[in-house]
Image: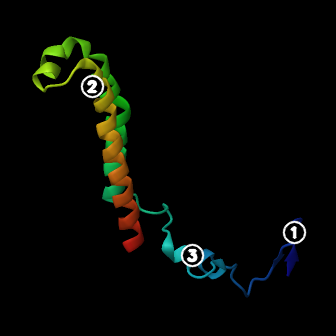
Amino acid sequence: MADDESGYVHRPDREPPSADATAVDGEADAQSADGPEFGASGWVLVGMVGVAFLLVPGAILFLPSAQGVISSLGLTLRDAYLTLPLVPAFVLGVLAVWSAVRSQSN
């Protein structure tokens, strides 16, 4: 037996414990070496966050030049400024609930 500076005693007849042996209640089995899988619902959420934080603010910048389209929908410019951010907010809420329910059922 050899004793190094850390106080670890190397025993050639025994292997060091593996990560699976030290896991509590199968914790290592639940996650792979790369971590938990992101999945399709995660990518849907990432896409919607991109729409909510990039596309909608960009569209808000162009609202004054699109007054003809807005008025053809029966909305005023004020209505468009209020509803444009509201739509992705509702969609993000629904997607968050869907993702949470889906992750609990798996």
Which dot marks residue 27? 3
Mark 2 against mark 1, which lies toward the viewer?
A: 2
Q: Are dots 2 and 3 in contact, CB under 8 Å? A: no
Q: Which mark is residue 4?
A: 1
Q: Residues within 10 Å of mark 1 (few under 14, many from 20)?
A: few
- State the CA–CA distance, disc 3 to disc 1: 31 Å
Instruction: Establish if 91 lies above or below 67.
Output: below
In the rendered image, which residue does mark 2 sit on?
Answer: 79
Image quadrant assignment for residue 22: bottom right
Residue in the image at 63% along x and 82% along y = 21
Q: Residue furthest bottom?
A: 13
Of pointers 3 and 1, the one earlier in the residue sequence: 1
Q: Are marks 2 and 1 in contact (CB under 8 Å)?
A: no
Going 37% across and 73% down the picture, which residue do you hit? 105
Q: Secondary structure at mark 2?
A: helix
Can you tell which quarter of the image residue 53 is in?
A: top left
SS label for mark 3? helix
Direction top: furthest residue: 65
Specify the amino acid type for callout 2.
Asp
Q: Residues within 10 Å of mark 2 (few under 14, many from 20)?
A: few
Q: Looking at numbered disc 3 in the image, what kind of residue is underneath it?
A: Glu
Q: Position of residue 56 (x, y in %)?
A: 31, 29
Q: Quadrant of the N terminus?
A: bottom right
